[in-house]
Amino acid sequence: MNPYWGNNFFEFLWNFITRLPKVLTGLEDLAQDEMQIFVLFAMSISCAMLGVILVLRKITMLANSISHTSLLGIVIAFLLFSKDSADTQMSVSGYLLASFICAMITTFISEFLTKVLKVQEDASIALVFTFLFALGIVLLTFYSRNAHIGAEVIMGNVDVLMLNDLKWLAIIALINIFLIAFCYKEYLITSFDFQFAKLIGISAAFFNYLLMLQLSATVIGSFRVVGVILALSYIVGPYLITSLFINDYKKLLIFSPITGCLLSLIGVALSRHILSTYRIALSTGGICVSLIALIYFTCLLCVNTKKKISYEN
Amino acid sequence: MSLLEFFLDPVLRAPTWGCMLMAISTSLMGVISFLKKRSLVGETISHSTYPGVVLGIIFFATFFPRFESMSIVFVLVFAFLSSVLSMKILNYIETRFHVKSDAGLCFILASFFGFGLLLASHAQFAFTNHYKKIQMYLYGQTATMHDVHILIYGLLTSLIVLLIYIFYRPLQLVLFDEGHAKSLNINVSKINKLFNYLLVLSLVVGIRSVGIVLASGMLIAPVIAARQYTDRLSLLFVLSAIFSAISAFLGNYLSVVMSIDSNRTLPSGPLIVLVSASIAFLSLLFAPKNGLIFRLARISEFKRRCLQENILKYIWKTNGREVGHSSIKDFFHLNSVSLKYTLLQMKRKKHIYNSNGSYRLTKRGEQIASNIVRLHRLWELYLASHLGMSIERVHPNAEEMEHILTPEIEQKLVSILNNPKKDPHKQPIP
């Protein structure tokens, strides 16, 4: 029995806070809603941190590109590793392979197109990811017996989660935190000043590939669980909201994930509220994305009026 | 099924024509966004049609559930409006708040699409009968098209073609030289606006057959292919329309045939995109003049000519001493096989001949070699006397230029340098 059944927004939050210590110490079992919250926490930490670096490097659309090509990576890994198609949980090796394949293929082909075939950069990104995504879908429909390609492929399903998913996303989040904290200086320098990085012996190409690997691991981790659109929104959204108030790179890396976590908590609470009060079951992922957009535009308007006032004074 | 049936058969013709019309309209607008270097805008526009599609279906299902065939109109109108809204917001946050273009594109894409999914999750329970219709727009489905659709798509496509035809001149000016266009009193911002709306319109037309997720692929792939064959704008439009029509036909054809063979419905969108992307890749590799293969061939041809000329020069400079196979090999650091091949070719051209194991120049070979040396020394002199380079540094540059200088340039050099006799190293110019 779900302890949050019938809760409205504030009851939900209160309930969550009171239950939190008990859940963390293992006194109570993890409820479905709490699972959602923790999964979204893990994902928003990974995505928001990567998002700061991506926006700084002006390659956010590459996240969009990888989010599409991850399908191909998953399909290939699926074909190679799973013997019966009913098995939806991917093995660890399959998972690693998928993210590796997807990052390498996307980055490599895009670079090949721009550098060797002299296609302009934006066009080569657009060509590569649509091609690979199309290939992924065709392979999927051909080889899986029960191909259900609907919204689930892009949206995932936050409403049906398993403990395994949480474990995976938590591991990815930890790795991302560790890598970014550890390579903070390298990422900073390679983003801001290529020449200087080269001069002091930091390989920009290596960190570019590392970033792509982190990104694709995160996107693929989110893929089955929450869907790529939510991941995409968490990559840019928290950064945009936080950057309205903070300009410092280091602080952004800390506060964007916090913003992301807060937003996911509110999102899940809102989803429960709508279900209990209006009896409408909406997709939690959709609510989170819309919430991020809503909060961002509200913040924009606030900042806007503030600026106007200070200007007039 | 013969190919002709795909154009005439009452069941098959609607998908075929619908796909081709839609592909033509998106690829024409793709040319413009390609040249503006904003290829990824299409991705955002096509994704932000989704809430419009869902709203359109909901609107139709609530108010006019009886006019089944009219649902397309609502979908088109609402999708158009929601994309236009997304573009307005994007423009607003980019200009007003200086959000970086890529972050803005990505954010608007995710927000609109996410909102669409929110609406769709509502529609799944509230309008279960129509939910399938909504999902169909994600990856495109052509099998359920009717003649009505051809009519609507045909009208919209001809509108786009007509407007491009009418505004061809100002468009060309705006695309390649905005400053010049402004000086000619062309309203640049109006032209840009018009074509932004047309871009949205073409993608709205496209989502039915290629799908929301992949529509931007159809925007860009045909024009990448077309760009390999021509430098002219008008031809670019025509070629990318042709490529897109071919890929739409083939994609749709494959979708129908493979669906029948494998007994499952293959969505048409991915197949159309696969075909058009393959055309683009093939063109990038094999197009005459610009394709990779031909470029590589030209480069290796040039390298071979340089090597042959250098060998001629080497033999010429030894002045009749013995030049064996091994001495050439040591001088140029070549492997035996490629050297043998090169020498064989030179023999065949009658530039050199073999006497007792050493190579000698024929009359023709001597002429070429002395001409190369002449160009080399003329260029050295020119660098030293007219460009003021120090004498020690002129040689490496002349080593390269000697293969490139044409007879006309040689004439000019001779007249500038007053028909000199010695180069800066005091060597005679032949």
Image: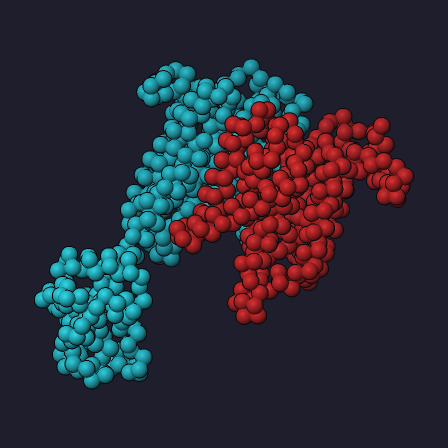
Q: Nearer the viewer, residue A25 or B104?
A: A25
Q: Is residue A13 left or right of residue A219?
A: right
* Location of residue B215 with respect to A296 vertically, above or below: above
Q: Is residue A280 left or right of residue B254?
A: right
Q: Is residue A91 left or right of residue B411?
A: right
Q: Position of residue A161 (x, y in %)?
A: 73, 34
Q: Is residue B58 left or right of residue B294?
A: right
Image quadrant in which you'd find residue A32: top right
Q: Which chain is cyan?
A: B
The residue shown at (80%, 38%) is: A34
Q: Nearer the viewer, residue B251 or A13?
A: B251
In the rendered view of the protein, which quadrant contains the C terminus of chain B? bottom left
Q: Position of residue A218 (x, y in %)?
A: 65, 45
Image quadrant in which you'd find residue B135: top right
The residue shown at (60%, 64%) is: A189
Q: Position of residue B97 (x, y in %)?
A: 60, 54
Q: Position of residue A238 (x, y in %)?
A: 68, 49
* Location of residue B122 with respect to B170 vertically, above or below: above
Q: Which chain is red?
A: A
